[in-house]
Image (cartoon, rainbow, N blue to C red):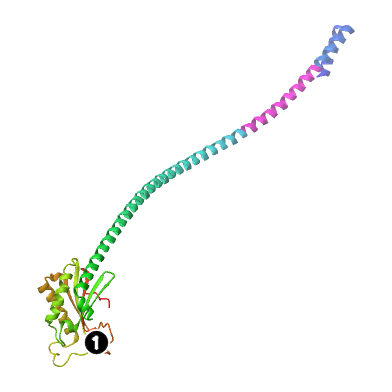
Amino acid sequence: MRHIYLLFVTLSICAGCVSQQQFDEQLAKTSAAETTMREQAAIANDLARDKVELEQIRQRLRSDLEACQGDLANANADIDLQYGNLQRLEKALSEQQQAARANAELSARQITQLRSGQSELEKQIERERIAREARLAKIKKTYDQLVGKLEEEIDRGEVTISNLQGRLTVNLVERILFDSGKAEVKPGGLKVLLRVGDILKQSEGKVIQVEGHTDNVPISSRLVDKFPTNWELSTARAANVVHVLQKKVGIPGERLAVAGYGEYRPVAANTTAKGREQNRRIQIVLVPRDGRFVQSDE
């Protein structure tokens, strides 16, 4: 471009026959113009480079923006997920708290019920203790009365009375009530039974169980038709004692019970006369109303 310009200037000089001074001035202007043009070209080049760089930056920023938008979308999705989880946790926590409150209320009610039940049980135990002590006191009173009424028979060994843990037993040997091999109560035995019955009659709430016992000697041939075995003899004797208590003493039949044990509940060995005499006996036992025909303590 410079050469073209110089050529144009040269032609102008030649054509116009300009002076040297004018030529130099024109040349200086041309040089200045060239410098300006170069500077403008450099600026243009710089601007072009800057444009490329700015475009690259813009592309990177756009890419970063798209990436940020993707991250934001992911973050929003994660926030939605965590919010849903939070709601579920809050619901579960609320349900657990409600359940805990319900359990606490239930436990409190149960504790109250247990304490109330314990208090009632303690009261019941105390009532039963008082009732038991009253029963024991009555039994002891009955025992003392029997001992006082039957002192002579006890001294002769015809009657023994025991009071074991509130279980009163009157044991009468055979000879005081019956003749050998017979089941009818003797007059002397009747007097004893009346004294015993009058005292036992006062023991309300108790059943009077009359038990017949024998030794192991078989029934004699003269009595076998009437009493085939000792079972029948022991039962008949117990039944006759019950009849006396009912008819002579006036004890209601529902308070009386009969048991015949024959030879099978001995209190002594049957190998001696004394042992057999001890085994031939009538036992009168006071038992609870629901304890009929229980085995007596020997």
- The residue that label 1 is drawn on is 276
- Quadrant for residue 66, please give it: top right
For disc 1, the neighbor class at 10 Å (few under 14, some 14 to 19, many from 20) is: many
Residue furthest toward the left? Answer: 247
53 left or right of 5 in image = left
Q: Depth check: give the residue in front, 258 or 15.
A: 258
Give the total number of marks visible in the rendering. Answer: 1
- What residue range appears in magenta? 35-63
Query: Above or below — where is 233 with respect to 4?
Result: below
- Asked if 113 appears above or below 134 in the picture, the reply is above
Q: Is residue 265 shown left or right of residue 31?
A: left
Decide: is 11 above or below 234.
above
- Does residue 48 belong to the magenta stretch? yes
Q: Amino acid at mark 1?
A: Arg
Q: Residue furthest right?
A: 20
Q: Is residue 51 magenta?
A: yes
Which quarter shows the C terminus?
Answer: bottom left
The answer to which quarter of the image holds residue 36 is top right
